Amino acid sequence: MNRHNMFWGAALILVGAAFLASNMGLVSLQWPLLWPLFFILLGVYVLLSRSWQPSEQVSEFNIPLEGAKAGTLKMEHGAGKIRLAGGGNAADLISGRSAGLTHKAHREGDVLKVKISTAFGSPESFFPWNWGLGYRDWQLQLNPKVPTTLKVESGASESILDLRNTKVTELKVETGASSTTITMPERAGHTRARISGGAASFQIIIPDGVAARIEVESGLGSVKVAEERFPRSGGAYQSPDFAGAANKLDLRIEAGVSSITIE
């Protein structure tokens, strides 16, 4: 029996004991008191669950290009950690190690379209004692030479996307309460990136030699941009040589309660 089951088993015993004591007249149990008790138990579980992650078998996988000249990759990740970098095999669009990952791939002309997601959709996963099974740690390597469109959707996660040695030309990141570090491509030509998040922390690293135009729309929080490289011009930050640069980044960030650092 894992610790998730032990916690919720103990919680059910506690609630059952309270009802028994009420029926025996030992205590006076009122329905309005039950809802706060439920949320207290749920809060305790959420706080402890990060240290209770179940051990699962980690397996290696790879998705071969099979002659494709470009790729689109969509990643759907819930809670946990994503570590993505270049340096993958020349014959694969993406490869890596993970637990609980599913993937689909199909060709459309010269483009290989891939979707990877968390294997977390069985009916029993909706019960609280199985919520911890949604935590996943992905370690992925992307092909460094194939032009790729990348979309990342994540929840309560930590994402480290090192795209320096990749050919990512389109990037879209949508995240919730998370911490996200992105190193942008160094030699991908013109990269367009759109990043959005809620209560999130973003650190964006733009390699030397890459020009950038940056737009930031943020609610509460802080925004720090290296203005010595990207001087503010109107409603954006922009490198002086952006128009004619061989390698450049067009970046837009929309965030709520967040901390944003761009360097």
Image: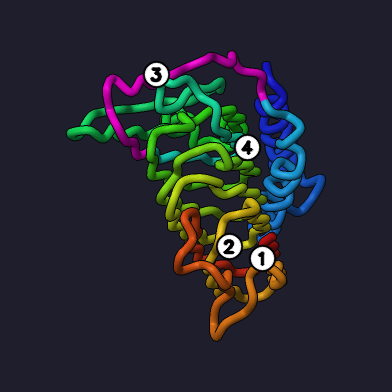
Spatial CA distance of label 2 from label 4 is: 17 Å
SS label for mark 3: loop
Write the residue at 73% across / 51% down.
40
Could you tell which of marks 1 and 4 lies nearer the N-terminus?
4
Are there few (<14), some (14-19), or many (20+) residues within 10 Å of tag 4?
Answer: some
Please say if 52 is above or below 249.
above
Q: Position of residue 66 (x, y in %)?
A: 28, 20
Q: Position of residue 83 (x, y in %)?
A: 61, 34
Residue receiving disc 1: 258
* Amino acid tagged 2: Gly
Write the residue at 58% across / 42% down.
164
Please say if 40 is above or below 49.
below
* Amino acid tagged 4: Gly
Write the residue at 66% across / 65% down.
258
* Amino acid tagged 1: Ser
Q: Which residues are magenta?
A: 54-72
- Tell me if label 2 and label 4 are in contact, CB under 8 Å: no
- Tell me if label 2 and label 1 are in contact, CB under 8 Å: yes
**Numbered tag placed on residue 91 in the rendering:** 3
- Tell me if label 2 and label 3 are in contact, CB under 8 Å: no
Are there few (<14), some (14-19), or many (20+) residues within 10 Å of tag 2?
Answer: some
Spatial CA distance of label 4 from label 3 is: 28 Å
**Relative depth, front residue between 219 and 109:** 109
